[in-house]
Amino acid sequence: MKSILLFLILLGVVSGRKTQLLKGLPATSTVEENTAAGVSVYDFNVTVSPSSSEGVAILPTIVNSNPLTEAFDIESKGGLEYRVVTTGNPVLDYETMPKSFDLQIFVEDTTGRTDLNILTIRVTDKNEHPVFRGNVAIQTLMIYVLEGTHPERIYQVDAVDPENEKLKYSLLPTTVPFLITESGAIFSTKEFDYEKDPHCYFLNVTVADLDGLNSTKTVNVNIININDERPYFTIKQRIYRTTGVLQVTGRIDRDALPLRLHPSISLIVRVEDSPSNGHASEMEITIIIDDINDNPPECSPSAFRKEVNENTAPGTFLIDLRNYCKDIDVDPSNNQFNFTGLSGFGSNNFTLDSTVSGRLVMTGSVDLENPANPGIEVYTLTVRVQDIAHPNYSNIIYIYIRIKPVNEFFPVFSTSSYVFNVSEITKAGSSIGRVHAIDKDWPPTIITYSIVAGGGTRDYTNIFWISSTKGDVRILARLDYETTQKHIFAVQASDQEKFTTASVTVNVLEVNDEEPVCSPNFYSFQIPVSLAVGTNINGFRIECQDRDSDPRSFRYFINEGNENNHFTLSPSAGSNTSRLILASRFDYESGFDTSWIYNLRVYVTDDNLLSVRDKTIHLIETGTVTLSIRVIPNPTTAITTTPGFTVVTRRENLYSASAWYVPFVVTLGSLLLLGMLGFLGFLLVTWLRTCCPPAGRAHRTPLINAPEKKKHKKDVVVTMTKLNTIFDGEARDPVTGRMYEFNTRSGARRWKKSNEPLQSMLAGQVTPSATDNSGQGTDRAEAASKKEPSEKRKELTAATKPATKPSADQDGLRLQKQKEESEGRGLSSVAPQGRN
């Protein structure tokens, strides 16, 4: 039953899986886009080892994400409960950002157990408001319409939906003489009369998606007055006296139509000598209208905006102002103008090619990184456009030149190579150093860090991790000096366009963290009770190796199981080998020793070269060796109990789901083990029946008539069993004085062959028991059962004669004969009476 229970436990360990620290991971969760900072995304727990008194050594940490992001963090809920929350940096956007993130979460408890698992977070879409684009999105739009203009499209509204849904436009109030189409075009529906209609209309333009989410902007439509009305007299009748003087009654504009094309006015002057029924005469007068310089030059637009890269070469042409300016005066002498007065902050970097042409040219190099140019990105220039003719009317032109930054510089690390010295016992998740890079470009760009080469081992793809924003380098697994003394990997600093790399060397500092490993680490053997003191027991020795310590640092001592200090190790220190020595003899006769089995726990430490003071501050590792020693008594030694021991070997196997063959092999091996245990049980039952037959059933009728029964002391009967054994030791039986051979490993014994007569040796043994008739009756029956059939027939014949009391001499001769027959058959082991 114990064997079956042990097998079930072993089968459970083999097929079991490693305990996870992160309970609830791996897992998948969702979060809605535009979620504010601090919103919980997923909850999980941490389970620690029962021996971990302080709980968690390294709190759950997001050590990496794919794609890279800082939009998530881990907060404690109290105890060993944690949650993943949003940080709001950046705000999640379904339309412009990745739809899914894989977060690698790492944790370590105080016993050194670690776990690394993945939480997948999927970003879900949220219906968002439509968004206006263009000028209407950033300001209140002003639209100007000339009166008398026929109904037409006056503006095109541009809007977009983040989910790319179809949009619907509407216009309020509905009473205005405007409409908007499905495509967002605004049309006027009438010809406006400035003198009769309102001069301004306020339109609320609304765009909505299919779910009703909408956005609204205001558009102002202004009606521009034009000179389309004739003057009229407010007084119907007035009497004038004619003086013959012709006067101008209103301003004559030579630059306006029709005088611009025909600069003359013809008048018919009629003169009468009487208001009525008089004589009259008419004369045509042609008046030539001369042009004067009464209009300043005007530019449309009056403000220019230009974007220039910061690395634009000197001499680059930017804008020709003359193409945008004119003077409406008719006479060429009055409509000539030039450009002067270039001024403004930074105007020294620009010039006008000539006062006539108005070509603006860059003369200097605009470098945003130049210390003399403190990050100026927009230059505001003014140019005066002015008539050449008197009275020299003029206007001001505004020119805004924005300097567009150019990514000119590569990121530069503070050093081309970094060296970090890290102890091999540094905990996983610890920071081991930081790299730093700068970029000379202005404005400053965000630099991201990554490991681009190296940083892995045979067991770990990525043993190092770097913070993408801070350059902090951490380790994800324990380092091992004995495996790799140096790690070299490359880190990259990138400004999204340009990148540079640096070498990182991690020197692993050796620490005494390896324990001595000895071979064998478990051994079981038997020794005779009479083994001489000082003997190397069975020639046994252990050989030890330590990956980080000199063999001279080894120290050997028996920590457990050495009752009465019978055993010692030699040498006890300073060597990679040591032998097991018997230090004192066994004494079971006086009761000083009671145990026949010694389970020794041998400790091997690597502190032999350390002083007493150094042992308190240095790391010391200890290896163990288990020895099971069974003491075998002499052939005549009587013991009342049968010593025994059980060896339990515990193995733990880590099962990988991909290794499909492991369960099959384990199951097959388990079946074979059950079959072997059953067969051994069958052999054990058979052996017990053979060695311990039921009392009194060998012969119903005794071969010798026994007198009245008396209680006497029984003799020691020697039973020999033939074994194919090599006997490498010898000793003298203290009772008989005879020599016997024994096997030092198994304890098996046999009498040593000798030419000396047996009678003299047996006489002393047989005489004391000659009077024990009842006790020897059974023994003789057993001896008689082993004789040849002819001898049995002789004894049966003798049994029919009258029974006589056998003498002591006859008993001695019969016992001596039985001994000789046993020796003749080559029996090779002895066992005390009463033992199985």
Image (spheres, rainbow, N blue to C red):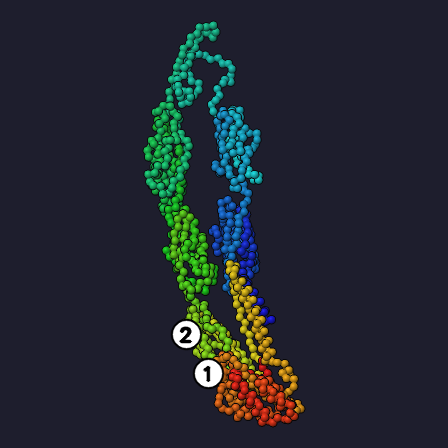
Q: Is residue 769 left or right of residue 295?
A: right
Question: Do we see residue 502 in this rendering?
Answer: yes
- Determine the residue located farthest toward the right in the rendered image: 708
Q: Nearer the viewer, residue 99 or 801?
A: 801
Measured as percent of width and height from the top left, residue 464 is found at 44, 58
Q: Nearer the viewer, residue 279 or 564?
A: 564
Residue 377 occupies which quadrant of the picture? top left
Eye-nearest disc, 2 or 1: 1
- Mark 2 crowd level (few <14, some 14–19, many ≥20, 10 Å Cα): some
Q: Residue drawn at (49%, 73%), measured in percent from left and top?
A: 522
Amino acid type at image mark 2: Arg
Amino acid type at image mark 1: Gly
Q: Residue drawn at (63%, 83%), measured in percent from left and top?
A: 698
Please, is residue 328 above or below residue 29 in the view?
above
Measured as percent of width and height from the top left, residue 77 is found at 56, 56
SS category of the residue bearing label 1: loop
SS category of the residue bearing label 2: helix
Residue 372 occupies which quadrant of the picture? top left
- Mark 1 crowd level (few <14, some 14–19, many ≥20, 10 Å Cα): some
Q: Residue drawn at (42%, 69%), measured in percent from left and top?
A: 548
The residue at which mark 1 appears reads as 534
> Sequence order check: which comes first, mark 2 or mark 1?
1
**Is disc 2 in contact with disc 1, using a CB cutoff of under 8 Å?**
no
Please, is residue 537 above or below residue 408 in the view?
below
The numbered disc on residue 552 is 2
Measured as percent of width and height from the top left, residue 28 is found at 54, 52
Question: Do we see residue 379 in this rendering?
Answer: no
The numbered disc on residue 134 is none
Please, is residue 690 above or below residue 619 in the view?
below
Q: Residue drawn at (48%, 90%), measured in percent from left and top?
A: 755
Assign the N terminus to one quadrant of the image.
bottom right
